[in-house]
Image (spheres, helix red, strand yellow):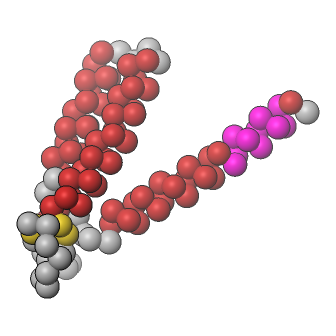
Amino acid sequence: MKRLRPVERDSGHHGAGTACPSYEVWAWAGFLVVAALIYVGFAAFNGASKQWTWTELGGVAGYGLIALHPGFVPSWYPPLCLGFDVYVGVVLVVRFRGLAVAARA
């Protein structure tokens, strides 16, 4: 099995040998934390138990820590993950609009 090499953080300069600027690492980490917080909101506002809401918050912390350490994630994964999420979102919107139209008919 191929081992992943840690991604070097740089000081914001796009020089040779740097794979991911530090501001980009923070941006991706921020996106992941915001996405995870949405699920915490769903849990909190839709009657989930306090234990489940705390479980969701634990997930936010875990994903946030992993996201801030880019050596765990290959460089191709964040854009692929984002593309997949957008694709699934579009499919769900189309599907739910189809259900709403069928329900009105």
Please identify the quadrant where the N terminus is shown: bottom left
The answer to whether 17 appears left or right of 36 in the picture is left
Above or below residue 65? Residue 10 is below
Above or below residue 56? Residue 80 is below
Q: Residue at 33% across / 40% down in the picture?
A: 34
The kind of secondary structure the magenta stretch mainly shows is helix
Could you say where residue 2 lies in the image, as x and y percent from the top left? 19, 79
User: Magenta residues, as a range?
Assistant: 94-103
Residue 4 falls within the magenta-colored stretch: no
Q: Residue furthest right?
A: 105
Could you say where residue 52 lies in the image, as x and y percent from the top left? 32, 23
Q: Quadrant of residue 53?
A: top left
Q: Residue furthest front?
A: 13
Mark yes or no: residue 4 visible.
no
Q: Residue at 56% across / 49% down in the picture?
A: 89
Could you say where residue 38 lies in the image, as x and y percent from the top left? 39, 33
The answer to whether 98 appears left or right of 68 in the picture is right
Please identify the quadrant where the C terminus is shown: top right
Q: Residue at 33% across / 66% down in the picture?
A: 77
Mark yes or no: residue 30 visible.
yes
Above or below residue 25? Residue 1 is below
Q: Residue at 83% across / 31% down in the picture?
A: 103
Tally of numbered tags: 0
